[in-house]
Image (cartoon, coloured by chain):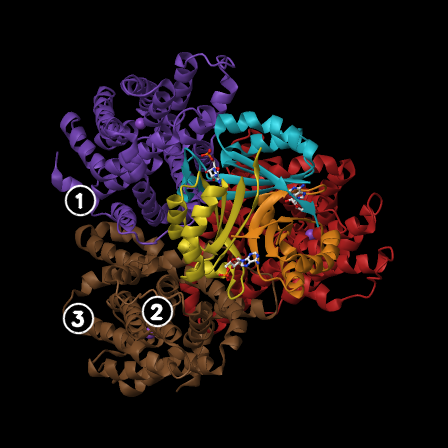
Chain colours: A yellow, B cyan, C orange, D purple, E brown, F red
Amino acid sequence: MKRLDLIFGERELDAMLTALEAAEVPGYTVMKHVTGRGPERIVSEDMEFTGLGANAHVIVFCELEVLERIKKNIKPLLSYYGGVAYFSEANPL
Amino acid sequence: MKRLDLIFGERELDAMLTALEAAEVPGYTVMKHVTGRGPERIVSEDMEFTGLGANAHVIVFCELEVLERIKKNIKPLLSYYGGVAYFSEANPL
Amino acid sequence: MKRLDLIFGERELDAMLTALEAAEVPGYTVMKHVTGRGPERIVSEDMEFTGLGANAHVIVFCELEVLERIKKNIKPLLSYYGGVAYFSEANPL
Amino acid sequence: MDSSLILQNVLTPPVLFFFLGTFAVAVRSDLEIPAPLPKLFSLYLLLAIGFKGGLELQKSGLGGPVIPTVSAAILMSLFIPILCFIVLRIKFNVFNSAAIAAAYGSISAVTFITAESFLENQNIAFDGFMVAALALMESPAIIVGLLLVKLLAPKAKDNRKEIKWRKIIHEAILNGSAYLLLGSLLIGFITATSNPSTVVKMQPFTGKLFYGAECFFLLDMGIVAAQRLPSLKKAGSFLIAFAIAMPLFNAFIGVLVARAISLEPGNALLFVVLCASASYLAVPAAMRMTVPEAKASYYISTTLGLTFPFNIVFGIPLYMGLVEKFIPPIS
Amino acid sequence: MDSSLILQNVLTPPVLFFFLGTFAVAVRSDLEIPAPLPKLFSLYLLLAIGFKGGLELQKSGLGGPVIPTVSAAILMSLFIPILCFIVLRIKFNVFNSAAIAAAYGSISAVTFITAESFLENQNIAFDGFMVAALALMESPAIIVGLLLVKLLAPKAKDNRKEIKWRKIIHEAILNGSAYLLLGSLLIGFITATSNPSTVVKMQPFTGKLFYGAECFFLLDMGIVAAQRLPSLKKAGSFLIAFAIAMPLFNAFIGVLVARAISLEPGNALLFVVLCASASYLAVPAAMRMTVPEAKASYYISTTLGLTFPFNIVFGIPLYMGLVEKFIPPIS
Amino acid sequence: MDSSLILQNVLTPPVLFFFLGTFAVAVRSDLEIPAPLPKLFSLYLLLAIGFKGGLELQKSGLGGPVIPTVSAAILMSLFIPILCFIVLRIKFNVFNSAAIAAAYGSISAVTFITAESFLENQNIAFDGFMVAALALMESPAIIVGLLLVKLLAPKAKDNRKEIKWRKIIHEAILNGSAYLLLGSLLIGFITATSNPSTVVKMQPFTGKLFYGAECFFLLDMGIVAAQRLPSLKKAGSFLIAFAIAMPLFNAFIGVLVARAISLEPGNALLFVVLCASASYLAVPAAMRMTVPEAKASYYISTTLGLTFPFNIVFGIPLYMGLVEKFIPPIS
Ligand SMILES: Nc1ncnc2c1ncn2[C@@H]1O[C@H](COP(=O)(O)O)[C@@H](O)[C@H]1O
Ligand SMILES: Nc1ncnc2c1ncn2[C@@H]1O[C@H](COP(=O)(O)O)[C@@H](O)[C@H]1O
Ligand SMILES: Nc1ncnc2c1ncn2[C@@H]1O[C@H](COP(=O)(O)O)[C@@H](O)[C@H]1O
Ligand code: NA
Ligand code: NA
Ligand code: NA
């Protein structure tokens, strides 16, 4: 199985989850209030009270074929709004 | 070495940590206030004020043999209360 | 590519990020308010209001060569202040 | 049933803020009250009503109607879950029936608070000792629910039949919200006895601030309740009907009991509200730990998404109408 | 321009706590107000000013200067972003210009609050209906900003040209802060009409606590503003000059308009402050979603790191000086 | 030593809520006050005592007993850590000894607050300038602790011997809690001088709310303290004995000094409490950064798990008894 890590702006969370559901993921886990730096933006904790929001970190464990569908669905979102996505191997315990 | 990711209901955290300690893990890391969706349940942030609680995400870096012990200890908990567990390869830096 | 997981005391976050920047990481993600147990210390949520602070969990996705630089920069910090670092394989989606 | 009473109830800040919250979800506003702020308000409200209840209890003493009222309250919280269980078994298995029944046998502190505000607005007197009834009605239903599971659930393979009383009692009276409410009640009582001067110093925090904090909390309750609605649809029409009809029925029994023990109108309303309200704090916490076989979305969606809003918007004035019909005003 | 007025303004708790926050960053103290506590105070302040504004609006009614003032306010929030856009286009592309322009056309509630406190300290009267102007000035600038993007942005490959009104309106008036402010205003209005007694019960929460909570929040604003400074340097000198000069110019236009519609000095100052202040809550939220092509650090760093501090420290007393020059005091 | 005084102290809301928290841990209730809510209360309390202290300091001026008291306080916070260090070296290495010594030389603001509440309950007068002593006693012990490490620690391989004064001073006076306390003191002082009218507006927040917020915070302190107990066992009996005996001894020295500088009973008690209390905010923060060789569980478990509860439950009334014995009441 695969493990997918998505990190992007909190405000896009709804759109991102909709895209994941459309790819028929078996489940997902969301961590909010995450900060960080990407190639362009620095996201700090204080952003949370401005309208911008911090980042969200979403983890999905799924089969390769689901991953392909996810890729198709979220690539446009990531390239429009920013954010990163990495996957690696994972095995159910 | 192995990396284990456990995601389950916050209320089971104590039981889960006890099970991990019983498996003699070298350490663990806990992230609370985590939300998500599994095969059955949706866990949203508002759950935190109802008695249900959100999810916890626990990470353990350990040797394969410890992982085997963990598996034995926590499988019953996961199948009774719900939650997921995945492991992958990891190397100390 | 590589995925690096760093877990250490929140109070060292600034020093750690400086070390990462010095290693010219392409980006990083920070999760604060993380708790856990290591070989020596237990870090619980209540620590956050004492002066000690909880842990921070930092994730870096980067190339192997960056990882080498990171290793050189942060090993002294980890051995002085405590904390753990593990890496694994990761692929951009 | 006075419809102007309903309107009057709706046009108060707590109920209006509740609507503001539900409406935010309806129009998809991104208004949110991030965790753990709702927890702050919920802890505060429990501490404050507990403390104030303790003061009043000390003033009124344990004589007069106190013991009968509290006893009746406890009996109701043992009887109602059994009643609910029987009704629920028509459609649900033992686990789900017991868990939902426990929720409806227990109480909702915020509904109680809203009823108190309603009475204050209507200038109807009520007694502080009713908070003791509130505190003591939280747990018995949990015990009944767990007993129903232990006694009636199909024998499991690992033979979980022996009743673990320790664990049951623990979940029932030591869960965070019940504990804080009871503890603050006790502290209020002790303080009023031994250090009355400190009571005055608590007043700005536990008294003055209360109404505003209640409004803020109800704003969040509105958001949360509205977010529950989709999963309510999944629960099916039987459960939806139950979430409205059962509180009404429980309220009706409550009025009869209140009349039997000659409660005055204000106290009677609070008594009825305790019977009619359902728990979304203590009971879900206990059920999640002890009856994980039950589907949490059932007892959370109904209590939070339907019964709670129904009670604070329509229920309270309806029950007041009922009380006025059945219970003679103080002459 | 009275420099003693500036000093008097600086030596009040809200401004001093703001300085305490900025200074903490300057000397690298580890003082921090962890999320989501700032959110708690920001929600509280919006709820409280909204509610109080609603009460006052009900008292004053919709006659007299209310309609003209509010209309002028809305017109200003349509006109200012266009003005800003023209200036910004000298240096920036359409996306960035429109986003920054929208921020400066909209308002900052905390600047408004600080101006109210300033007036109270100076014993200058002002009317509660100005909160309605505040609430109604938040959104129009967002719509103007989005329209500017839609009409003037280079045709994108995926042809995003059709204007999605639904989405624009949604982002403009249903973002959390605008929604809470407007909603609380409405609740205050309704409550004052139908249940005046409950207003008194809200008073400790929305009224008495306000000044202290404002100070606490400004402590955090000081920290956040100072943390923005480094990215401000990157933004370049044009934007830095813009963040000071534009508010001054907007204030000047504001004074002329205030004079034209014969506002009294207190209301005039608040009107000017609305014109001169820039949004870091509602507008960034909306721009992030609808114009992600714009660089967030531009509109956040300028509004929060420069314009906000400038306004609450120097701006308010300066604008008061301007108002005193141009607007005859009430005789 | 008046045991009725102890009982009277125990039966006040702050101490009772503290017990409610410890008891929750003892009976394994799941009551918790999730992060960062405790931080909210701790920031609030520091801001409020600082601000109130500043007001009082402005009222009383810097004449009379102010300078001698504050000087004596600073001297005590230099002397006590050396004394503690000598005792601790019997069992611990230089790093641990210095870190624990610094904690006991510094102060606990919440213990101080509880002592103030105690005095108010007993109708014993005290002066606001004692808050200045509180604020100024926080840091010197940190410097002493760090100096002890620098001077007496075994020469490390990387030759960390040169004393980095900048870093030491930074950690000592710019850590969040010391900074906020001192800053608020200053703001209170300035405001009382230049804008007395604003002081009244702060009063509901910094004054009225204080007692209740203190209770809420002590509820959490009770939970945290009780959670420390297991690691206390690991620390060993020497440290456990130290955590009780040392505060008593420091209190005794404190009384003698208070008598020598002729403090009145109320101020004397506060002075003694400052000597006897130990820091779990500023010092751990500083030690974690500068002496990571010391085991954090030692200085956290003792100060928070033992010395703090001992002081607020038994210490304060005991010290009052001591004060009454050694210091003549005001005639
Ligand atoms: N190389 C990286 N490693 C870890 N996290 C990253 C990396 N690059 C970006 N991120 C995270 O992704 C968020 C959004 O990235 P971006 O929109 O590309 O600036 C950042 O705020 C970081 O939290
Ligand atoms: N496929 C998945 N990928 C990531 N997280 C998951 C997945 N399935 C379940 N989870 C997480 O595990 C929690 C409990 O799962 P469950 O009890 O099976 O509903 C969910 O709330 C999710 O946070
Ligand atoms: N084996 C491990 N697996 C996961 N997390 C760990 C492990 N060891 C240590 N940690 C985390 O690293 C933090 C600091 O570790 P230490 O300073 O070594 O006690 C701990 O509080 C844990 O959160
Ligand atoms: Na009930
Ligand atoms: Na403006
Ligand atoms: Na001390």
Have a look at marks 2 and 1 and say if they share a chain: no
Question: Would residue F262 be visible to someone looking at this image?
Answer: no
Give the residue type that dot 2 points to. Answer: Ala
Q: Mark 3 points at which residue?
A: E67
Q: Tell which of E158 and C36 is nearer to you.
A: E158
* Position of the N terminus of chain D by quadrant: top left
- Read off the chain for label 2: E
Q: What element carries label 3?
A: helix
Which quarter holds ligand 5? bottom left
Callout 2: helix, strand or loop? loop
Vertical placement of residue F157 versus D289, above or below: below
Tell me the CA gap for discs 3 and 1. 29 Å
Give, as a three-letter code, the residue at label 3: Ile
Q: Of residues D271 and E71, which is closer to you in this image? A: E71
Of labels 3 and 1, the one closer to you = 3
The number of numbered discs placed on residues in the rendered structure image is 3
User: Do the residues bearing badges 3 and 2 touch, measured as CB atoms within 8 Å?
Assistant: no
Judge if badges 3 and 1 mark residues of a common chain.
no
- Foreground disc of the pair 2, 1: 2
Residue at 83%, 63% in the rendered image: F161
In 3D space, how far apart are the residues under numbered discs 3 and 2 (Cα atoms)?
41 Å
From the viewer's perspective, tell me whether residue E321 is left or right of residue C42.
Answer: left
Q: Name the residue under label 2.
A: E156
Specify which label sits upstream in the sequence, 3 or 2: 3
Q: Name the residue under label 1.
A: D8
Label 1: element kind: helix
- In three-dimensional space, the C-alpha distance between marks 2 and 1, rounded to whole angstroms, equals 54 Å
**Image height check: is F278 above or below E76?**
above
